[in-house]
């Protein structure tokens, strides 16, 4: 693959030192090193750059580079070219730091200055916190005290999710960070915003004149956003037990996709103008009382179920590290309302869960039915759908109705299909690192987005604590509890099948044909 083409970015990044806290962790190995290597291979990293890895483990520069290489071999998308590897690896060094010990930041400061001299890098520093959020505030403080954050050039702080576990903890964390960094210097990662098709929503909507006239409650019947996973909790029980699907997926990724679909056209395609419009969506998002949570939210937890080979997968409550009486939700479906002029009355259905039958992220926009006077085929006339496939097979399809060739006058659904070339999109982290290092925060989360998202989520979390709505068990390998279907069917709709793959024309997909559109009346 020619990944420069794929990254879609042409300009090399400015000289900088990338100080990576959590350099020995899973995220660094799985995502960040492969992304840095892709950028290097694409000649998007400048000559004058250095990465200083920081964590407690006692690595030498050499053994750190060995780990780096192993991570690239295991998780990288591209094969490692020996010559390129030599050039890449020499930019990496390691400093053993326990972030709870302020003294150790002095050592890190010396190391950073040393590499800045060696590579002739101006004081332009990116601090990336790939470690547990409980450390974020402390790290910021020690960066200040040690003068590491005191630079003549620019500095940026990139932080991972989760950003707090409710509004109050998020506010505390934000004020800790803001004691050292300006809002413009803080880059809060939501990796869904780095996904090609999520970024493409903006282009689809604002570069095509056919959509804007119908992008509203006069033409759209409902919006369905699904992010389903096949994996269970894996080895993250200690985090997930306190988080659940609501905090893990809804507060961030699902709401980000809602915002991208629902936002008004920004005054300019500039960072703050785009973020302003996204924030307005959250301001219009209806906040639920406990009774409304009961009516609009479904929560589930996976039970046992067969895997592909027929072996029984354990129920969530039997997973390692999970409380045997846990009430943590591993699935959520909800009916959201955006109470503004454009969207009043249009339900936005979202659902996300672990241990479901497919790994897929899809957005389906269902248009309103035509009057049935011409082609009333006893409920067989399907609605027009716009399907945005975010994962795995990135693409867009539009479902239309057309005449079946011949004389019987039958109307059949057909799909117009655009598929992104496989493997031609950069990993979300490649794009996000590129944007973050160059100081483009469009696809990062601004503080007011985070705080409004928590204001929406907190009352739902409170209702969950009161046992509202009841937690429904669903079988591993299914598509969530029956209550999720009932939520949508109550309004006369169905969840459209989600596969994450380009669909054959609907004519050849009979399971789609018997699905009703919105019933008349
Ligand atoms: N893993 C993933 O795919 C994803 C992770 N995230 C987020 O990224 C962050 C990191 O996650 P992940 O990499 O999985 O976590 P890991 O537990 O794998 O890594 C944690 C890192 O922090 C270091 N660390 C722990 N304590 C200290 C300390 N006192 N001083 C210095 N370093 C310390 C560890 O190194 P050492 O033990 O050597 O000190 C290790 O490098 C979290 O916020 C997580 O939510 C977000 C999305 C996906
Ligand atoms: O942030 C998270 O996202 C992943 C799902 O991301 P995807 O890119 O694979 O769709 C999820 O598994 C994880 O629990 C959550 O923390």
Image (cartoon, rainbow, N blue to C red):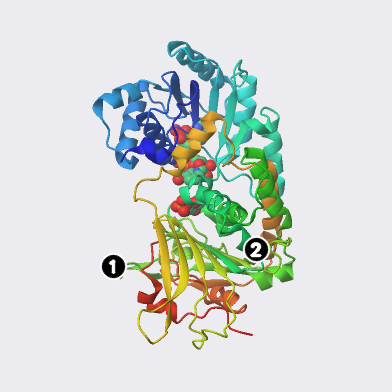
Residue 309's disc number: 1
Q: Quadrant of residue 77?
A: top left
Identify the residue at the far left of this view: 82
Horizontal and vertical percent for residue 228? 47, 61
SS of the residue under disc 2:
loop
419, 245: nearer the viewer: 419
Q: Quadrant of the C terminus?
A: bottom right
Say whether residue 462 is visible.
yes
Name the image quarter holding residue 371: bottom right
Mark 1 or mark 2, which is nearer to you?
Answer: 2
For the question of whether residue 242 can be seen, the reply is no
Which residue is depicted at the point 58% across and 31% down? 157
On screen, 328 above or below 208? below
Badge 2: how crowded within 10 Å, few (<14), some, or many (20+)? Answer: some
Q: CA distance from mark 1 to mark 2?
A: 45 Å
Report the front residue among 205 and 457: 205
Across and down, in percent, residue 312 comes to: 35, 69
Task: Report x, y in % for residue 70.
Answer: 31, 35
Instruction: Name the residue carrying label 2.
Output: 216
Classify 10 Å Cα crowding around label 1: few (below 14), some (14-19), many (20 and above): few
SS label for mark 1: loop
Side (left or right) of 266 relative to 513: right
Residue at 56% x, 62% y is 328
Q: Label 1 CB, ligand 2: below 8 Å?
A: no
Q: Residue at x 38, y 38 (%)?
A: 5
User: Which image quarter holds the N terminus?
Assistant: top left
């Amino acid at each position: 693959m020619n990944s420069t083409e794929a990254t879609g970015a042409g300009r090399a990044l400015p000289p900088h030192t990338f100080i990576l806290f959590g350099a020995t962790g899973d995220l660094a190995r799985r995502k960040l090193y492969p992304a840095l290597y892709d950028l290097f291979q694409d000649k998007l990293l400048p000559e004058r750059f250095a990465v200083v890895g920081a964590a407690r483990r006692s690595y030498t520069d050499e053994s750190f580079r060995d780990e780096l290489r192993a991570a690239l071999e295991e998780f990288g998308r591209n094969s490692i070219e020996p010559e390129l590897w030599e050039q890449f690896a020499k930019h990496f060094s390691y400093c053993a730091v326990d972030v709870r010990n302020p003294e150790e930041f002095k050592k890190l400061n010396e190391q950073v200055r040393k590499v800045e001299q060696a590579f002739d890098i101006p004081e332009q520093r990116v601090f990336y916190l790939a470690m547990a959020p409980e450390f974020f505030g402390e790290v910021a403080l020690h960066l200040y005290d040690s003068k590491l954050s005191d630079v003549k050039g620019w500095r940026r702080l990139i932080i991972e999710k989760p950003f707090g576990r409710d509004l109050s903890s998020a506010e505390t964390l934000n004020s800790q960070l803001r004691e050292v960094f300006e809002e413009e210097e803080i880059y809060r990662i939501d990796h869904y915003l780095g996904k090609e098709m999520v970024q493409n929503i903006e282009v689809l909507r604002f570069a095509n004149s056919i959509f804007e006239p119908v992008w509203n409650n006069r033409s759209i019947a409902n919006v369905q956003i699904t992010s389903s996973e096949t994996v269970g909790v894996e080895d993250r029980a200690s985090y997930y037990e306190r988080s659940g699907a609501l905090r893990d997926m809804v507060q961030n990724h699902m709401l980000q996709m809602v915002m991208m679909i629902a936002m008004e056209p920004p005054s300019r395609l500039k960072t703050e103008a785009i973020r302003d419009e996204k924030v307005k969506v959250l301001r219009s998002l209806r906040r639920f009382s406990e009774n409304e949570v009961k009516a609009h939210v479904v929560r589930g937890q996976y039970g046992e179920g067969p895997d592909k080979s027929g072996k029984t997968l354990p129920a969530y409550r039997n997973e390692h590290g999970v409380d045997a009486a846990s009430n943590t939700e591993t699935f959520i479906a909800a009916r959201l309302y955006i109470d503004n002029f454009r969207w009043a009355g249009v339900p936005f259905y979202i659902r996300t869960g672990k241990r479901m039958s497919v790994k897929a992220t899809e957005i389906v926009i269902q248009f309103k039915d035509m009057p049935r006077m011409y082609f009333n085929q006893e409920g067989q006339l399907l609605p027009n759908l716009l399907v945005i496939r975010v994962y795995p097979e990135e693409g867009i399809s539009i479902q239309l109705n057309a005449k079946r060739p011949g004389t019987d006058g039958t109307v059949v659904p057909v799909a117009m299909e655009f598929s992104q070339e496989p493997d031609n999109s950069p990993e979300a982290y490649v794009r996000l690192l590129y944007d973050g290092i160059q100081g483009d925060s469009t696809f990062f989360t601004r503080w007011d987005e985070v705080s409004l998202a928590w204001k929406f989520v907190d009352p739902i979390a409170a209702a969950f604590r009161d046992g509202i709505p009841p937690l429904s068990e669903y079988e591993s390998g299914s598509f969530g509890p029956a209550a999720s279907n009932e939520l949508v069917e109550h309004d006369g709709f169905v969840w459209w099948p989600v596969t994450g793959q380009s669909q054959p024309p609907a004519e050849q997909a009979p399971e789609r044909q018997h699905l009703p559109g919105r019933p008349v009346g």
